[in-house]
Image: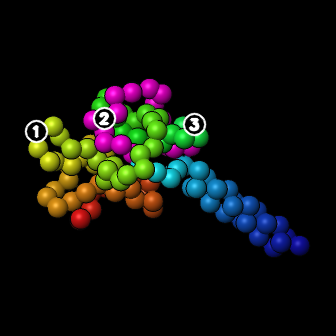
Amino acid sequence: MHKKGIIMVLAVCLLIAVADAQLSHKEGHCPLRNSVSKCTPKCVSDFQCSFNEKCCPNKCGSESCVSASPVSTGNGYKGSSNDDVYCGGVKCGPYQKCKFDRRTKREKCVRT
């Protein structure tokens, strides 16, 4: 009887973790960072934003809720004078793009 209780608790915890992971990352893509001038409301995950919005990097150096873009921009931003791509505040190297890592729930530079 005791084993069944432990298994039930573990199953419930697993279901909660899966539901939380699915809710924290919504479909769609973030627009280019330098096109997001709205700095509020600040957010940490998509779950904090309304139904049709995502938590995306903005010009202010933080993240805010904005409408999702149907087109992938690589989640980085391109500078106005060159083609540098930034990811989570870090400049990616040549032939790299910014991509969301579902395992770490952070953006990282990856090879194109």
Q: Is residue 51 left or right of residue 89?
A: right
Which stretch is magenta? 30-47
Q: Amino acid at mark 2?
A: Ser
Residues under labels 1 and 2: Cα distance?
A: 15 Å
Label 1, secondary structure: give it: loop
- Foreground residue among 88 and 82: 82
Q: Is residue 46 left or right of residue 34?
A: right
Circle 3 is placed at which residue position? 50
Circle 1 is placed at which residue position? 81
Residue occupying the point 30% across, 35% down: 35
Q: Quadrant of residue 96?
A: bottom left
Q: Quadrant of residue 30?
A: top left
Circle 2 is placed at which residue position? 35
Q: Amino acid at mark 1?
A: Ser
Mark found first going from the N terminus, 3 or 1: 3
Disc assigned to residue 30? none
- Return the x and y of residue 63 as percentages of the image width and height: 40, 36
Q: Amino acid at mark 3?
A: Ser
Total numbered circles: 3
- Foreground residue among 1 and 66: 66
- Foreground residue among 57 and 67: 67
Label 2, secondary structure: give it: helix
